[in-house]
Image (cartoon, rainbow, N blue to C red):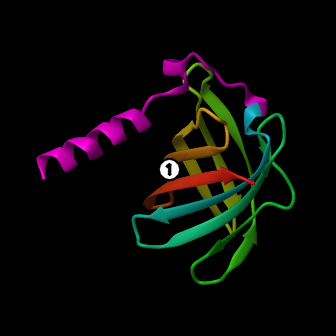
Amino acid sequence: MRKASRAVTAVALLSCWSATTLGASCVLSDLAGTWIGYAFNSGGFWTRCNVKVDTVGKIVQGSSCVGQDGLSAPISGSWSLISAANCTVKGFYTGGGLRSNITHATVSIDRNSIAGVGKASTTTFVFNANRL
């Protein structure tokens, strides 16, 4: 049991390495493209978003989110770099009358996934997104 626990801990620590550890850094245009994201909030509600981001971090027309209740809404907003050296980002999106703030997220080394945390109204959420 201890060996399994240590293996899980080692994998978790390795997955936390930032891009800086491997000598890479990010630029805002690394966020450009279409992303499919999933969020789960502290109220037990999940949301799936299709997010299109331009080269300056703006969430553009054609982006939308749908919740587990099946309701869909177009979204707008933007992403920006917190630290280029660490490939960390923040941002927000607004849709359906609600603003969701991404307070901290990290871009993967290959620039094809993002994972992070945020806050919307009275709930917090975790999310991950993969480049399509």
Name the image quarter holding residue 88.
Answer: top right
Classify 33 as above or below 81.
below
Magenta residues, start to end: 1-29
Name the image quarter holding residue 3.
Answer: top left
Please state if 36 lies on the left or on the right of 87 as rendered: right
Q: Residue 84's x, y, as percent?
A: 62, 22
Q: For mark 1, what is the residue?
A: 118
The main secondary structure of the magenta stretch is helix
Query: Which residue is nearer to you in this view: 5 or 87?
Result: 5
Q: Tally the numbered discs.
A: 1
Kindly identify the residue that appears in the image at 13 percent across and 53 percent down.
Answer: 1
Determine the secondary structure under disc 1: strand
The residue sitting at the left extreme is: 2
Q: Amino acid at mark 1?
A: Gly
Classify 7 as above or below 60.
above
Kindly identify the residue that appears in the image at 72 percent across and 25 percent down.
Answer: 27
Kindly identify the residue that appears in the image at 77 percent across and 38 percent down.
Answer: 57
Query: Which residue is nearer to you in this view: 52 or 58?
Result: 52
Query: Which residue is nearer to you in this view: 15 or 54?
Result: 15
Kindly identify the residue that appears in the image at 58 percent across and 37 percent down.
Answer: 108
